[in-house]
Image (cartoon, rainbow, N blue to C red):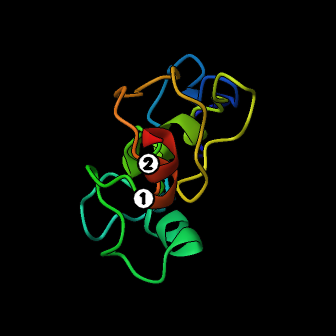
């Protein structure tokens, strides 16, 4: 943005004009910084970084079956959160339970279930 004796605070993302004492023009331009074409709450670029298409993950899917939805892992990552063991959230790697948005529901691979029954 430019015009009218502007100041911009990059930390708060607030633009302010100077004192308006006469007519002046403010010019602004905007751009899309992320896209979510499938409306699942996960940025398309990140979704394609981890998955082969936009249909694999959704707001409710849990690809790695760790008790965090794929969308929740995206949101935790976006907020700079770490799981309870200090690891980055990753929808293809099981994160430690108990973090923000953990449902308490986790699944184990069938072989692990079989071992646990014995």
Where is residue 11? Give x, y as percent: 69, 25
Secondary structure under badge 2? helix
Q: Which mark is residue 113?
A: 2
Identified at 67% across, 29% down, the residue is 82
Secondary structure under badge 1? helix
Q: Which mark is residue 67?
A: none
Outermost residue on the front side: it is 118
Q: Is residue 70 visible?
A: yes
Mark 2 Cα within 10 Å, few/some/many (few <14, many 20+)?
few
Q: Are marks 1 and 2 in contact (CB under 8 Å)?
A: yes
Identified at 75% across, 28% down, the residue is 86
Outermost residue on the bottom side: it is 52
Identified at 24% across, 60% down, the residue is 39
Q: Nearer the viewer, residue 30 or 85?
A: 85
Where is residue 97? Give x, y as percent: 53, 27
Mark 1 Cα within 10 Å, few/some/many (few <14, many 20+)?
few
């Amino acid at each position: 943005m430019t015009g009218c004796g502007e100041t911009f605070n990059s930390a708060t993302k607030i633009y302010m004009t100077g004192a308006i004492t006469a007519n002046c023009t403010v010019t602004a331009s905007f751009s899309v910084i992320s896209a979510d074409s499938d409306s699942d709450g996960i940025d398309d670029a990140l979704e394609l970084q981890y998955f082969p298409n936009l249909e694999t993950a959704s707001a409710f899917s849990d690809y790695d079956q760790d008790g965090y939805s794929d969308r929740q892992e995206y949101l935790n990552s976006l907020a700079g959160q770490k799981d309870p063991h200090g690891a980055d959230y990753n929808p293809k790697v099981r994160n430690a339970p108990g973090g923000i948005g953990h449902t308490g529901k986790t699944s184990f691979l069938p072989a692990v279930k079989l071992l646990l029954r014995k």
